[in-house]
Image (cartoon, coloured by chain):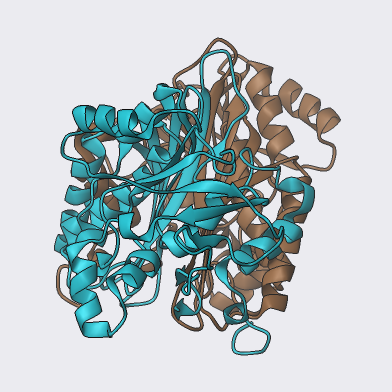
Chain colours: A brown, B cyan
Amino acid sequence: MFLSEPAVSNLTESGLIDRIARWLGPLNPPAPEGMGDDCAVYPPTADCQQIVTSDALVYGQHFDSSISARQAGIKLVNRNLSDIAAMGGTPERAILNLMCGPDLELAWLEAFFFGLRQAAAAVNLHIVGGDICRLNPGCFTSVLTIIGTVDKPLLRGTAQPGDAILVTGELGGSLAGKHAHFSPRLAEGRWLAQSGCCTALMDLTDGLAKDLPSLLAEDQTAKLLLDAVPLAADGSAAAAQSGRTPLEHAFCDGEDYELLFTLRAGESVPNFLSLWQQTFPGVRISHIGHISHDLTPGSAERLVDAANGQALPFSKGFEHFRGTS
Amino acid sequence: MFLSEPAVSNLTESGLIDRIARWLGPLNPPAPEGMGDDCAVYPPTADCQQIVTSDALVYGQHFDSSISARQAGIKLVNRNLSDIAAMGGTPERAILNLMCGPDLELAWLEAFFFGLRQAAAAVNLHIVGGDICRLNPGCFTSVLTIIGTVDKPLLRGTAQPGDAILVTGELGGSLAGKHAHFSPRLAEGRWLAQSGCCTALMDLTDGLAKDLPSLLAEDQTAKLLLDAVPLAADGSAAAAQSGRTPLEHAFCDGEDYELLFTLRAGESVPNFLSLWQQTFPGVRISHIGHISHDLTPGSAERLVDAANGQALPFSKGFEHFRGTS
């Protein structure tokens, strides 16, 4: 079962997801009902639609002993809430799977639940059930599945050429702390869904370089205003150590948990930015480019520098089975 | 975080669940909306109620290389379906979390998905999304969360004194093969929910000794007809090796995935058994006792031999963090 070739590590994450979709065949309905967006969407009922998302938190992968147990609990909730935000939805109920070695300290676990409870209570999210099971000593994995509602979900791949591309917050260097200390953009996501002027929405988890192409329809490219990409101070600090540029850190680091979205062509970007700042005065907003027809459909270069038309030199984000590129 | 005292291994599973309920406080609503039954139940809508359940499949815990990848995939689906069956529900949609080492063989994973698809297709269950992430080499964990519907869920703790206790199939010795080769009792669960004569229902996963007390209300005991407990041939074979009795194996082995339920007092048990056999001719049904008032409320002895009024000598089932008793 392990250690033979070919193994999972031979595939990128999207390559593995493509395989899984093929293996599941007709049991995997087209997005957004099936795989492919931030949440799966139930067929609409009279009132609203239901959305479901699930994310794991693995010791040694998503956190280590540099963050507290409480912060680990908060992170598990918030990374799932970020997916709910990315549909413009509202969280309702959650199921928790707890898997750990018999040697896990109870005091650590209690603090983990304290954090989980704090983050869930902040958005009135109920934890309605789940499962516990044993892992080998030294192991801890927790999975949270959140069910939420949305009036009209904002999807990926639904923008049109000419739509402006915007992003909240600042990007890069998340590992220095933000990965465990971010606020999921729930209010912002709901506001965007209700605004009527947002044409596509997702959250940034694997880095702009890897995530932005999945916002685009197949025949689209993103023309980017590189000077406008909001650089986090932690990304610039990381650049001073890594020898890479702050821009590359902003594109490739991952775990930004910011919202990436498009504004309908014809809407005034300055007016939108002004309205945003009145509504969310503490949340930076940046207009970083626009959607364009892909002149060479099927090209691997989906991200283009608007200044010179050249493909960006970095086109990969975080790869789960192969490390960062 | 690990290896200090007190650790998780100091608690029983139910002790750990009690702690978690306390830690979650008001975020954990009372059952069946919150923890405590086979599934969490959504508040009813006009049409029907929604139910949610989640179970993991961990390499080294729930399966090993003695079963095929395909069978592991089938087991993951079927152990979740058994919880849906235990509410009288119908499965609709599932979310899959896949966590594995980079060294997992793709051929193994493909066969795992083949089994998962086979079991899901058999009940028209759609796999609508999920998450993948990396574990250390040699590790494999998968979590499935199923959302289903039910007209009127059958719960635990809702039986009355005098109700008869019945169980499907045969108990004990599951590790010899049944744990990975069972059929979830979905049709039987739905039929019981629609029959109007079933007062409480659950599935047997940790053994009759541990599971039956959770079917009872706090002021109830179960008076058991020990000669009527259906002994699996594999449990008797295990007894020949272990030096324990086949009855103890039937009570304590776990992973039976049979339905345990109660029939309203006043209903004719012989008539019910006859109707069952006409409806499910291939599924053995056994009347193993009845619900009684607990004469000493709060007593730890919830299971009593009807023949002599003595508490059963074995009262524990499978303990996730401490091994079997």
For image coordinates 34% across by 55% down, the residue present is A13
- As rendered, which of A290 and B9 lies closer to the eye? B9
Q: Position of residue A276 (x, y in %)?
A: 77, 29
Instruction: Relative to A132, say whether A94 is above or below.
Output: above
- As rendered, which of B150 and B243 lies closer to the eye? B243
For image coordinates 68% across by 85% down, the residue present is B6
Q: Position of residue B75 (x, y in %)?
A: 27, 54
Instruction: Relative to A15, say whether A112 is above or below.
Output: below
Q: On the rendered image, what quadrant is the N terminus of chain B found in?
A: bottom right
Say left or right for A231 vs B175.
right
Say left or right for A64 vs B78.
right
Q: Position of residue B41 (x, y in %)?
A: 57, 35
Q: On the rendered image, what quadrant is the C terminus of chain B found in?
A: bottom left
* Viewer can see residue B325: yes
Instruction: Relative to B248, say whether B27 is above or below.
Output: above
Q: Position of residue A82 (x, y in %)?
A: 61, 44
- As rendered, which of B11 and A310 lies closer to the eye? B11
Q: Which residue lies furthest to the front in this view?
A: B308
For image coordinates 56% across by 68% down, the residue present is B13
Say left or right for B247 vs A64.
left
Asked where in the image residue B14 lies, by quadrant, the reply is: bottom right
Asked where in the image residue B189 lies, by quadrant, the reply is: top left
